[in-house]
Structure formats: C-alpha cells, structure tokens
Image: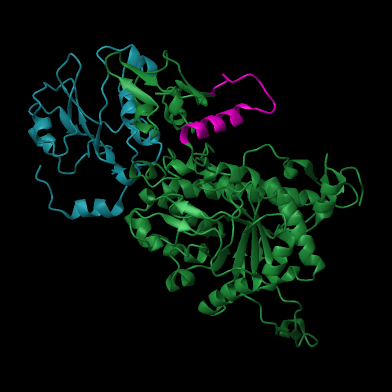
Chain colours: A green, B cyan
Amino acid sequence: MAKPKVFSEFIVERDEEKCITCQVCCRMCANDVHIYDSETDKVNSDSTKCVGCHFCETVCPTQAIVIRRNLSEPKINAHWTQRVVTEITKQAETGGVLLTGMGCDKPYLSYFDHIVLNASQVTNPSIDPLREPMELRTFLGRKPDRLQITNYKLQITDAKLQTEIAPQLKLETPILFSAMSYGSISLNACMSLARAAREAGTFYNTGEGGLHKNLYDYGKNTIVQVASGRFGVHKEYLEAGAAIEIKIGQGAKPGIGGHLPGEKVTEEISSTRMIPVGTDALSPAPHHDIYSIEDLKQLIFALKEATRYKKPVGVKIAAVHNVAPIASGIVRAGADFVALDGVRGGTGAAPTVIRDNVGIPIELAVAVVDQRLREEGIRNQASIIAGGGIRNSADVVKAIALGADAVYIGTAALVALGCHVCQKCYTGKCNWGIATQDPYLTKRLNPEIGARRLVNLLRGWSMEIKEMLGGMGINAIESLRGNREQLRGVGLSDTDLKLLGIKPAGEAW
Amino acid sequence: MKRIYIREEYCMGCRLCEIHCLVQHSKSKEIIKAYKGEYPKPQPRLIVEEKGHLSFALQCRHCEDAPCLGACITGAMHRDKDTGAILCDENKCVGCWMCIMVCPFGVILRSRDAKKVASKCDLCLGEEVPICVKNCPNEALLLQVDEKAEKEIKEEEPIEE
C-alpha cells in the first residue's frame, strides 16, 4: 500500500500529568481520535483523524487536551502553500472532487475591515440609547410608490390611509437567520433557530429541506424556501410560513445545485422532504422552469396566487458579477425582497474549488444593487437582505449603511450554537450536534440552550447597533439605510470606493 | 421536594456527571488528586445507563415510599427532615446490603472502601445544586420541583409509618 501522504492538520497534545483517563474524550469524538488502552491505562490520540472541532478540549474536565495546528509543513513557498500541496495530494489519492463546508476561507480583501464608521462631535449631538428611544424595528417588503391619505385637511386624527400596503415582515432587529435546511443541520439546530427567532421577534429560514411537523408552531417566524429541488413544498408548507423565498443560488456555491447524500435521508427527513428513505436528495443547479426573468415572474406570481397575496415573496441569489442588473430584473419581476448571498456565505457541502473561487464579496454586491435600484427608481419596490460573512454588529451596521434593509446570519448563528468552523459539515460527523443526523450526535445540541444562546447573540448585537447609531446621532435604523456618508474607506482603491459609493477616510462631507 | 429530573433526549453520554460526582465524594475534592492520588479510588454515587444512542444518568430517586428505609436493619438509611432526601448514615451502616436488594432503580452501590457500607446519592446537601446537575454540559439533568408530579405523589395512598 502506498504511504498516505496527507499531513495531519492538527496535533492533539495531551498533558499526561493532568489526564485522569476518564475517557470523556474517547466517548465524545465522532472521528475516533481518542482511544483508551486498558493495558497501559492511557488514552492515545490519533492526530491524523482530528478535524479541529475542539469538542474534546471543551468537555475535558481537567483541560488536559490542547488541539494545535500542525506546524510541520513543507518548505515555505508563497505559491505552493501547504494548502495547495495538501489538496493536490488528496486528489491524487482519491481522484474525486474535493468537498468542504462553511464559507470561503481564502484571504480575499474583507471590505468590512476597510470601512470605518462615523460619530457625532460638537456640531451634532450624539444620542445615548440607554436614555433615549432607539428604533431597530424593520419592515421587509414592497413599499408603495406614494401614499394617498384622505381627510387629512380636517384633522390629523381623521386622516385615513387609502393606499393599500403590500404584506410586510416585521422584525424587531434587522437580523434574520439565513436558510439552513433540516437535513444539512439537525432538527435540534432548526428548533434552536426557530425558538430564538420567535423570542427575538425575527425570522429563520427553512432552507430547501421542507418544514418538519414539529416546526409548524413557529410558522409566524418562518421564511419558507422554494428551491430548485422543490423538496417538501406543498400547500400547508407555503401557508405555514410568514414569507416565501425562491432560492436561485447561494453564496458558497453559485451556479451549483445541492446534494444531500442518501445515508442522511432518515425516516424523518424523508417525510419532511417528501422523498423515499435513503435516496439522494439532488437539487438541480438551475430551476428547470426558470430560464429567464419572465419565468421567474411566473413562479413569483404562482406562489403569490397560491397564498392569496398575503405573504411577501422574495428571491435569493448568490452575489455574482452581474448582480445589479439581475437584482433589477428580480425586483421588476415582482419580488418583495431580494436576498443577496456573498462569496463568504456558508454551506453544508460544496466543492472546495467553487466555494473558494466563485462569487463576489457581499459588501460590493449590496452597494451596487442598492445604487442600481435607486438609479432606476425602484428601490422602494423591494427590500434587500444581505448575507454571506456577517460576523458582528459592526458588519451589520456597515451592510445596512451600504444599502441593505436587513442581514442574514448563518455561520455566526451556528458559532453561537457551538460550531468551531472546522468545515467538516459535509461528513455528517459534527461533534457539536449541528450538521449531522446521527442520533448519537444530534442530542448534543439542546435546543433550549441553543435558543438561549442565539437570543443572547441577537440581544448583544442589537444593543451594540443602538450604541453605534447613537454615536452617529441617528435614532432609527431607517435613517442608516443607504446612508453611505456614515462610512469611510481605509486603504481602498479609487475603483473600490466608487463601487461602494463611499468616500475615503479623511474626506469631509 | 426538589428532585433531579432526567432528560434522556439531551444526555450525550459523556459521563461528566459521574466524574464530578466521584470528585465531590472524594477526600480532596480535587479532580486530579481524586483520580490519581486517592486509594481506594473514590466512587461516584450515580450510574449512567446506556443502550445504543440512548443514555442517561441515574441517581437515587429519593422515593416518597422508599423501600430501602423499611429494609434497613440498623436505621442507617433515613430521611433527612429538612430536605426529604434519603441518606445513609455510614456510621450505623453494617453493610448487609438489603437496601441494594430492594432498591427498584439499582442506584444504591456497594462501597469500594475498606469499610463495608452502602453508598448512595446524597443530593450533594450543602451545595447549591447537586454537582452532577451543575456540571452537565447539556442541561440533561435538572434540579426542580415538579408541582404536578409532587401532587400525584401526595394523592397516592399515605404510607404507613
């Protein structure tokens, strides 16, 4: 047999002085890294199997384990990096497409990290959010072109709104949980998201995995997705959600379909997705009934018709080179919101080469889409939800100032549930009980704890957003939307600044 | 009374409850010393039941109608007046193990110490919460008063003293 030539990525360091051979690590590792040897009364660790999820480190009662990066690397080479060499080696051994999970981790420029925010000094007062009201409430959906009010001449209390307002989603904070299907993540993870969404007054998204029967209770806080595979789409499903999202693409794998391997299609998933047990769930790359904006319009209105025009219907696309004109077409096709997913957007499984090389950063996508819709005078017709790499409240504020109405968080939410971004979602062996259907592993995520942690995250971010708004002298998130004067670029090229529509730091109003 | 409730759907089978229970009932109450420096090795007062992916920690249920109380020949097994917990007075216990015979849950254990006594959960009296509950990483163990269950216990026929 040929020698395995792939380096182990991590080294498991065990402090023998501290190790009490309690074997918690042995019981908890789904990758069988830690094995107890009763003859020597020692726990041995096989570093080659370690994926770096740090679960053993977390549960070890004596902190005897530390997972370190394996620093043994080939000769330093800026072009032929260890990563490149490892990938070639793996493919030479397997001959297959390399798979991965989560979002693109290549060191492309992060525009968020090159944008700074404004604050009030002397000439305009800042606001203390602890003393004065601060509005984060956001409405997603089509806004009317103009408002018609009758009787307003007599008395303001007699005024009546004549314009019919299109259905809206009401969010208490401009953050939603992005689409993650039951199948790609466990039911306990879905349950955590659903409960947190209800408690925080926002929404989670079913992804294309259908809606499990236990989740119908959370319908008012659910965005149901209709994707190319049409899994689990039926009348009750569409009626259960507060809004419908047509998924055209996702940031981690634009132009690529989905593939849930048959071994993950358990009894529960099969009934939720409406496919036979054990069969692969294949989502085609395109919707086979959508080959143009006109076709998309048909689906949007078919869904609106099916739900009696009571729910907003949006469209999610991956941010690609032509994103602005595509978004314009989507809005003109009647979408009530457009969700944009940037290159950093996550996934349960995607070819590594696609995840790392296809799509554009969300910062640029939001800026150009907002600009384009404004220029065409149709910005009011749809809300923009930005997703794909939103890491903290500052990213939320920057995305909104660049033109988004709200943001989708996926990876950040999973990290709150325990995820350590080891990118092994596609193996189905998630030790944290998130991206797995293994009954030994899924029970590790207690949805009560999960929901509590997610609510904490949203609460923390919301308070920080209020602080940042207050600093700018703004008392409502509405006034921040597309307010690019609050942003300045640091170390960006003229072209970047032009595309983002912001001034360089140092330039006054 | 406050009881330990088990939620087996969240028990991940890590046995941290068992480990911390052992430490709590060791001489030093320090984890590394308890495991590496104490002989005879201290003993956990709970058991972890496992079958397939189903697992849960089981401690003394501190039954309202506790068979071990009636079976004890020396009066070592007694009910704590303040908390309602069933405790074993190890000074009185002679190690006849009748309590082990009658316990319907099998949670009274033979002590591994030199002295032959019965060893069981004492609800970590003195601690704010039992140590197994405190250290369960997934909140599969809860210390609470289940009003409904308590009411049902009360409504059952009174126990003859």
Q: Which residue is at the front of the view, A336 or A446? A: A336
Taking the magenta stretch, the answer to whether it contains residue A122 is no
Left or right: A117 as drawn, with respect to A444: right
Q: At which x and y percent is residue A157? A: 72, 82
What residue range appears in magenta? A69-94
Q: Residue B137 appears in which quarter of the rendering?
A: top left
**Position of A481 relative to A244 (above/below):** above
Taking the magenta stretch, the answer to whether it contains residue A74 is yes
Q: Residue B80 appears in which quarter of the rendering?
A: top left
Residue drawn at the location 15% of the way across and 27% of the way down: B76
Left or right: A494 as drawn, with respect to A234: right
Q: At which x and y percent is residue A226? A: 52, 65
Q: Which residue is at the front of the view, A58 or A403? A: A403
**Position of A252 relative to B45 (above/below):** below
Q: At which x and y percent is residue A85? A: 59, 28
Left or right: B128 as drawn, with respect to A353: left
**Position of A229 relative to B114 (above/below):** below
Question: Is residue A383 something that shows in the picture?
Answer: yes
Q: How many marks?
A: 0
Quadrant in which the N terminus of chain A is drawn: top left
Q: At which x and y percent is residue A50? A: 46, 29
Residue drawn at the location 70% of the way across and 85% of the way down: A162
Q: Which residue is at the front of the view, A246 or A490? A: A246
Question: Is residue A475 something that shows in the picture?
Answer: no
